[in-house]
Image (cartoon, rainbow, N blue to C red):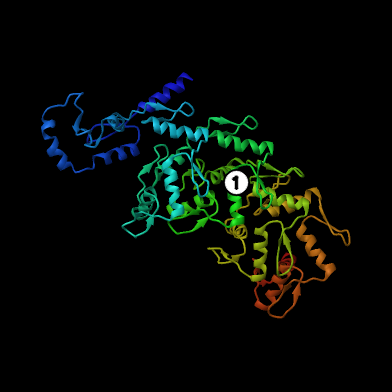
Amino acid sequence: MEKKESKSKEKKTDKKYSCEKCGCKFSNNSNLKRHVKTHKKDTAASNKESNAAVSQKPSAESNTQSVGKQVTCEICDSAFPKSYLDIHMRTHTGEKPHRCKVCDASFTQKSHLVMHIRIHTGEKPYRCQICETSFSRKDMLSSHMRSHTGVKPYRCKECDSSFSHLSTLKNHKLTHTKEKPFTCEICGHSFSRHSNLKQHLHTHDEKKPFRCETCASTFKTEELLKDHAQTHSGDRPYSCDVCDGSFTTTLALKQHKNIHTREKTYFCEGCNTSFTNKSGFSRHKCNHVHEKCFCCEVCGTAYSWKSQLIRHLRTHSGERPFSCETCGASFSRKSYLKPHMRTHSGERPYSCELCGSSFTNISGLNYHIRTHSGEKPYSCDLCNISFTSTSGLTSHKRTHTGEKPYTCSQCNTSFTTSSSLKRHKFIHTGEKPVTCDICGLSFSMRSHLKEHIRRHTGEKPYSCEVCTNSFTTSTSLKYHMRTHTGEKPYSCEVCGSSFSFKSNLNQHMQKHAVS
């Protein structure tokens, strides 16, 4: 503990960035840049006024000049009421005497500490009378009120866009200058906003003093810990009076009610898009600033959201925290577990309006619809073959690279896709988990059962546009189309003869084997 304390003290006193104007030192470059701006007044005018004072060294007591009821700082020439001068001088000395007992953050003013403590207590004493949103600071409430009144007093001189808040205008100006003045001293990433740098720094050293006694998760505020605790207890005390939905927090309930009222309380000043909830609005804002604060230390990939980074890190660690209680299958995302559960319940809520096929998730339906429309939006940049899904394109690219990342643990055979490995494993286990209700035949894959059932029903959903022949499977239609196109993708390496089907090539190869 003593070593840690001494290290932290060394860190705090290490001020290697010096102001060339006044000699003040700072621990990081961003603080120095902010300080330098205090010198950017008209130096010529200030030199005339201070020439007499400069001719002889000022004493420690005469560090200020009185101007009526105000005093002037001799370092940066700013004028303040006498009572505020001591606080102002801390911007030059770097002194922060007011320290938070919870997280050890320090501040130049006591009022700033009081506002900071509300982050930990969750106190929000300033409430909007129109929408009942609460804020920890009065100035935040004043800014929020403009979202109701529509007042936009801050205008950009470059493009004439107007904004409700000065901070939004400042951030907007960076889209013109492309300037990123805030740099992380640990990894060198630069950001256009100080808030984004601050958020990014949490990825290096995040302090979360509030710990959950059930699962040991830690949180920045007591309010976030309370919300989290309800995920263990199952308690949902806040109910919707329209649809009886229940929620763990008042914020979640409020955002849910917007679904019924269609009210969109969050407005983007950059493009006038509106949102029903703050999280959607925050995600959208990243599209304008193009900043990704959360970086993977393993491979360097950067993300706009911490949740995206957490999900990504599981691709390195192999962690799968979401498990199926029925079969024990585990998943890296909760969104993957939900559709999997439907394979046990038989629920298929997403149906195709063209053929009636149903699916466990909407991505499966979207992929299926392309079999009707013929749309193939994903193209290989090596051979120009197109695919209906990104996963199909990814699997195809492995035919060029020769990559086979999925290996059978029993016989070491490798495959380009996880589904191919899954099918292969049934050879070892002999498992055939899906059964035809009509004739009792069992199959290892649900897709095989689906094709088999069409033999009983006579259904042939895949039709040839050239000759109107119909087929039970898309593969059969694909093979049939070669009789019209003359395509022969299978070539003999011995004599160069080409064939439409692999079975024909295999028969042909036997002739070479005999000779």
Q: Position of residue 45 (x, y in %)?
A: 15, 42
Q: Which residue position holds label 1?
A: 252
From the top left corner, tell me how far across and down residue 429 is, in percent.
Answer: 80, 48
Seen from the viewer's position, the closer of residues 282 and 358 is 282
Please indicate whether residue 449 sits to the left or right of residue 107 in the image. right
Residue 21 visible, this orientation: yes
Q: Would you identify the image quadrant in which residue 72 lies?
A: top left
Q: Is residue 134 left or right of residue 315?
A: left
Residue at (54, 44) in percent of width and height: 309
User: What percent of the width, then of the height, locates residue 9?
Assistant: 40, 24
Residue drawn at x 19%, y 31% as measured from the top left: 66
Please name the amino acid that badge 1 sits on. Ala
Q: Is residue 220 visible?
A: no
Q: Nearer the viewer, residue 98 or 218?
A: 98
- Mark 1: few, some, or many residues within 10 Å (few <14, many ≥20)? few
Residue drawn at (64%, 67%) of the image: 370
For residue 116, above or below residue 279: above
Left or right: where 362 falls relative to 41: right
Q: Residue furthest bottom?
A: 467
